[in-house]
Image: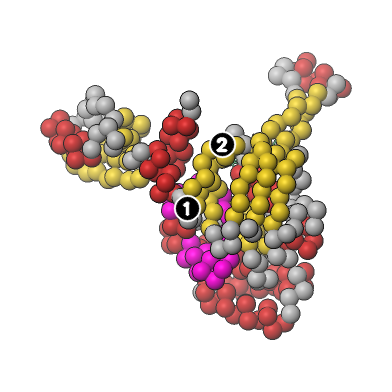
Amino acid sequence: MLIEVNRLSKSYTTFQRGHTFKETLKSLFHRKTIEVPAVKGISFQVAPGEIVGFLGPNGAGKSTTLKILTGVLHPTSGDVRIMGYVPWKQRKSYVGRIGAVFGQKSQLLWDIPPLDAFYMNKAIYSIPQDEFEETLDELTSLLDVHEVIRKPTRQLSLGERMKCEFMMAMLHRPQIVFLDEPTIGLDVIAKENIREFIGKMNRRGVTFILTTHDLDDVEQLAGRVIVINHGEIVFDDSIVAMRSFVGGGKMVRMLTEERFPDLNMPGATVVRMISPHEAEIELDTGVIKINDFFARMNGMCTLLDMSVQELPIDRVIKQLYLTKSP
Ligand SMILES: Nc1ncnc2c1ncn2[C@@H]1O[C@H](COP(=O)(O)OP(=O)(O)OP(=O)(O)O)[C@@H](O)[C@H]1O
């Protein structure tokens, strides 16, 4: 196995603050510590060549896990072996074998062109000149950034910058790349470019572990999904298995000529009124078929427009928890 994680836990120690002014003042002199359990004994393995999507709501423990796997954080307990390394113990040699892209944090330097930053990485990772040039040419063509890498980073669009962040992470030809929200804030085209690039690199044997809130990222890329909630793994399988596990839910958006009618249909729940004439409805297709739902709606009002989409990731995950709770 490429990655082995066994009973990994991480708790943060923070100081308790008071709610009132008096309590806050008191806490300055008598600091009370509290333990925040962020990751609670998770175990999983990743084989070479996998793309694993790490999903979960805010505060679930995804970033904490990723920080431990990249060697940035020490865990409180548990074992991690990645390509034979213990990330936080053999950090120096380990980082030469992995890459990381954090959507919210840049590894480039604001005032200099990405190309100059790439040369800095060449020195840091001691990449031989011919290997560096070969990889640089290849990545520049794949991402179509011939001009972009020569402009100062601050002049780049977010999509252009993300392409350069990926180059920065891949120049030393890592076997595993960790991605934290790699498509956050990108437009549809830029997202597609990044996903295409990840797919191509994966076909060449690079393993990717990514956290994301974008279900399209995992649907288009990840063969496997690990869902984490309150620091525990609640699901570890394919996205197809995840959808079938929670049943077939759909999100329907409808615009009606009249005021949107009161729905009194089992399996159909209005989750948001966009205007008095437009609503978002969550359908439990195990209870009501899409066909039957439309037929009943047609009998109740005049439909002007509608769209049907997969449930957003947060809804799927929420359903997953509901299904899994006793
Ligand atoms: N440095 C820290 N000190 C104290 N608590 C922390 C620290 N970092 C994270 N936490 C807490 O640990 C828990 C897990 O946080 P983490 O950032 O790993 O979640 P996440 O799944 O990545 O969330 P998000 O999707 O919002 O990025 C949260 O309760 C968070 O408040």
Q: Is residue 78 above or below residue 168?
A: above
Tell me the magenta residue range: 195-219
- What color scheme is it? secondary structure
- Residue drawn at x 72%, y 17% is 20
Q: Is residue 37 left or right of residue 149?
A: right
The residue sitting at the front extreme is 1
Residue identifier under label 1: 218
List the single residue furthest toward the bottom.
130
Looking at the rendering, the quadrant in which ligand 1 lies is top right
* Residue 148 image point, x, y percent: 57, 72
x 24%, y 43%: residue: 306
Where 26 sits versus 156, above or below? above
Q: Where in the figure is residue 146, as x and y percent of width and height?
A: 56, 77
Residue drawn at the location 63% of the way across and 41% of the way down = 42
Residue 19 lies, in percent from the top left, at: 70, 19
Q: What amino acid type is highlighted by mark number 1?
A: Val
Towards the viewer: 296 or 117: 296
Magenta stretch encompasses residue 305: no
Disc 2 and disc 1: Cα gap in Å? 17 Å
